[in-house]
């Protein structure tokens, strides 16, 4: 029956699109987390340098 062949094809295309969308969402989430982690580490490094500068001025 040709209708079932079309339905199976459409279902496969929709499923593939769902997997592709899920992959994009996961990839964007991981990239956002990596950027957040990098910003945190840079902020901590800056705070450490400022503390060292402040201690050097006090001496």
Image (cartoon, rainbow, N blue to C red):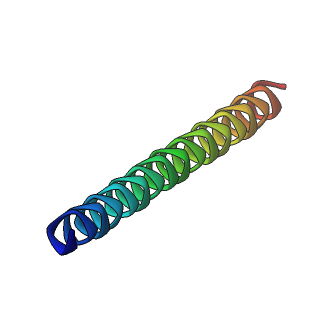
Q: Quadrant of residue 57?
A: top right
Q: Taking 1 as reference, is 53 above or below it?
A: above
Judge left or right: residue 36 versus residue 42: left
Relative depth, front residue between 42 and 8: 8
Identify which residue is drawn at 47% across, 48% down. 32
Provide residue 23's location: percent of width, then percent of height. 47, 54
Q: Taking 55 as reference, is 53 above or below it?
A: below
Provide residue 44's location: percent of width, then percent of height. 66, 33
Judge left or right: residue 13 versus residue 37: left
Quadrant containing the N terminus in the rendered view: bottom left
Q: Quadrant of residue 5?
A: bottom left
Identify which residue is drawn at 35% across, 57% down. 21
* Number of numbered tags placed on the structure image: 0
Relative depth, front residue between 19 and 7: 7
Quadrant containing the C terminus in the rendered view: top right
Judge left or right: residue 7 versus residue 45: left
Judge left or right: residue 54 versus residue 23: right
Q: Taking 9 as reference, is 48 above or below it?
A: above
Outermost residue toward the left? Answer: 3
Identify which residue is drawn at 55% across, 46% down. 30
Q: Taking 49 as reference, is 20 above or below it?
A: below
Provide residue 4's location: percent of width, then percent of height. 21, 62
Relative depth, front residue between 3 and 35: 3
Relative depth, front residue between 59 and 17: 17
């Amino acid at each position: 029956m040709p209708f079932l062949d079309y339905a199976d094809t459409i279902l496969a295309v929709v499923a593939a699109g769902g997997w592709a969308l899920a992959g994009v969402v996961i990839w964007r989430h991981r990239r956002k987390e990596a950027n957040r982690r990098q910003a945190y580490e840079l902020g901590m490094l800056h705070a450490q340098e400022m503390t060292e500068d402040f201690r050097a001025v006090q001496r």
